[in-house]
Image (spheres, helix red, strand yellow):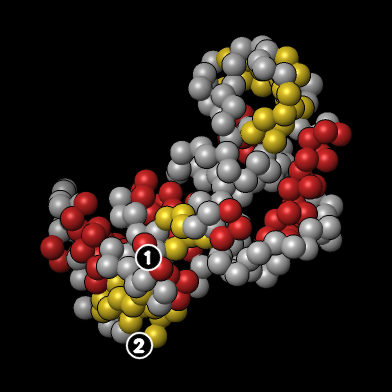
Amino acid sequence: MVKFMINNKKYEADEGETVLRVLIQEGIDIPYLCYHEALSSYGACRLCMVEVIAGGGKGITTSCTLPVSEGLEIQTETPEVVQVRKVLLEMYLAEAPGSKKIQELAKKFGVVHSRFTDFDIEAKGDRCVLCGLCVRVCSEILDVGAINYAGRGTNTSINTPWYEISSSCIGCGACAYVCPADAIDIIDKDDERVMETWHRTTLKLKECVDSKQYFATEKGVNHVCSKCPDLPEEMKDLSPDSRMRKIAADFVLKPRRE
């Protein structure tokens, strides 16, 4: 354990823990877009800036990439940090004018209007902030890599290779789940799932043999089964709800030892 200070208050954490994780755990309010606890730290959105006062290189830096260390002292609300944060939020408002979540986040930290009006958002749409969470969850967690950054400069976007229907996407929806800007559209219609944002990549849905409800894509189920070879065969055709009911029923009906 190492001892350090945040906003003049003493804290302890495991060596190597990031400052942002400590801030979140301690309920200290700080904005962020590109961080998720299940993924590696990235430092792309810059919103989680803090100012290092002592115990490290002094100055403003991203808390998601800053490890705690003995004697570290940081401040989260210095005038410099607040100013940087507001400018960034103004830029995100201009970059993602169609995202209600970005509007809500900006308003929470005192930013309602943006001075920036010349952002070219045609390539990526009016909700994406290019935080990269969708790219990283698809690569780091799913090991699929169906999407990535494309283009350069103002034409940068996140999409499928060559902007074409993806042959590797499994339709799991993890990208939409982690997106902080609600910028990814997925539509389930009849027995198909359409990944609207990824050039309408379309996948067949799998029907639960118990409930007769569609619960995931066939490709997604096959991917999970390949990663979990010990999954009982009878579980592969059941939705999560049906699996829970089966496990509960098996437990209740299991003979008890006298």
For the N terminus, the image quarter is top right
- Picture residue at 61% right of the left edge, 58% below the top: 154
In x, y percent, where is residue 200?
40, 77
Q: Nearer the viewer, mark 2 or mark 1?
A: 1
- Residue under pointer 1: 162
Residue 190: numbered disc: 2
In x, y percent, where is residue 53?
76, 19
Q: Amino acid at mark 2?
A: Asp
Please name whichever residue, 66 or 12, is drawn nearer the observer in this view of the structure.
66
Q: Amino acid at mark 1?
A: Trp
Left/right placement of residue 146 relative to residue 22 reads left
How many residues crowd around disc 2 within 10 Å: few (fewer than 14), some, or many (20 or more)? Answer: few
- Picture residue at 52% right of the left edge, 45% below the top: 36
In x, y percent, where is residue 63?
63, 32
Left/right placement of residue 117 relative to residue 170 reads right
Q: Quadrant of residue 247?
A: bottom left
Please name whichever residue, 238 or 60, is drawn nearer the observer in this view of the structure.
60
- Tell me the SS state at disc 2: loop
Whole-number angstrom distance, CA of label 2 to CA of label 1: 28 Å
In x, y percent, where is residue 138?
38, 54
